[in-house]
Image (tube, rainbow, N blue to C red):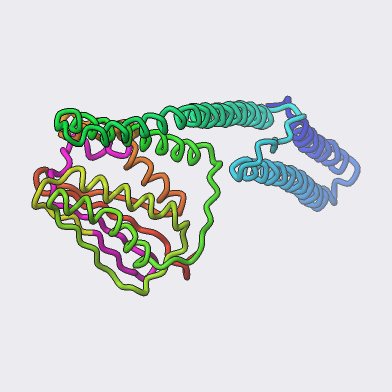
Amino acid sequence: MLTNAAIKRLFLEISLCLASIVVLSQLAVRLLPDWAPLCLLVLSLLTAGGILASCIRYFLQQERTLEEAQAQINALLSGDCTARISCDEDGELFKLFHSVNTMAAVMAAHANKETQAKEFLKNTIADISHQLKTPLAALNIYNGLLQGEAADLPNIREFADLSEQELDRIETLVQNLLKITRLDAGTLVTQKALENVGDMMGEIEQHFSYRARQEQKTLQFSGPETTMLFCDREWFMEAVSNLAKNALDHTKSGDTVSISWRELPSQVRITVTDTGSGIHPEDIYHIFKRFYRSRFSKDTQGVGLGLPLAKAIIEAHDGMIQVDSALGRGSIFTVNLPIPTKL
């Protein structure tokens, strides 16, 4: 404790005050016996004042030190990785400050390493995607030629159609990997503007209406035409489209997928409801994990990136997503996004 210069100074000042009152009181008793009581009272008051002044000075100094440390810690929490607490003196408090600085340096190094890893992953996936585009385009052309030549060969035509589906799956997987990697790396720049929710939902309805008819499913959209949302149109539609696709993937012929939206006092709420197979209780807490595959799922086409990508996009818009599901009865995905007046 006495290694701290400020504490040593405080103890020294208190010791000097106490020593002074002892010496001066002895002199007063010997030299001024008649005035000894009054002298002792005055000396006691002076000593108490001196000790109080020393304590006040010490605690004010400690308060300034702690305020400076708090300011540096707040700077660290705000993202300034270079902020450090001054710890040039000795003492337990400055040892603690030194430990905080060490922890900050380690965290900064880890953050830098993680940033580099994300950047490397982004670049790697971008390179792989670029390399895949040419062979995928060629395979699509060859497959189209096969479909044209196999018009009178049902078996070959069937395999060519299946091949086209698999090529589409590969292309979708590559695109989703690119999107989610850009979100992770923080390189995604959103172009937010006031958008009409009804207009965006109309485009999504057009995109999925053909599939719904082919699979004999009912696709319903409902909500006010005047609802506005401050968002990136392309990315917002990507998120809702992934939720709609997920609902269609987990429903069967005769089921219904409903997408509705409404404006609340502080947010816009979008709900995607289906009457499909529902989510097993074992999976409900894992569905937003990447590449997660339920052992109960009958979906053999998905790769487990649609829902994580939707969640990442919604959170990039300062929104929240939650799910409620009953096995065998369907699922409800609820998205809450802040409205423009609250931004």
Give the percent coordinates (x, y) of residue 98.
Answer: 67, 28
Above or below 29: residue 2: above
**Magenta stretch: residue 260 in it?**
yes
Report which quarter residue 145 is drawn in. top left
On screen, residue 289 versus residue 150, left or right, reads right
Q: Nearer the viewer, residue 90 or 180?
A: 180
Report which quarter residue 28 is drawn in. top right
Q: State the residue lying farthest toward the right.
A: 31
Q: Nearer the viewer, residue 25 or 274?
A: 274
Residue sitting at x 53%, y 45%: 188
On screen, residue 100 versus residue 316, left or right, reads right
Report which quarter residue 199 is drawn in. bottom left
Q: Nearer the viewer, residue 197 or 20?
A: 197
Q: Start and end of the magenta stretch?
A: 259-288
Above or below 257: residue 114: above
Give the percent coordinates (x, y) of residue 105.
Answer: 64, 28
**Magenta stretch: residue 118 in it?**
no
Above or below 32: residue 165: above
On screen, residue 216 versus residue 129, left or right, reads left
Q: Nearer the viewer, residue 65 or 173?
A: 173
Q: Is residue 178 visible?
A: yes
Residue sitting at x 32%, y 57%: 204
Report how many numbered discs are placed on residues in the image.
0
Give the percent coordinates (x, y) of residue 24.
Answer: 86, 40
Q: Is residue 40 visible?
A: no
| Quarter that holds the N terminus | top right
Residue sitting at x 47%, y 36%: 181
Give the percent coordinates (x, y) of residue 122.
Answer: 52, 32
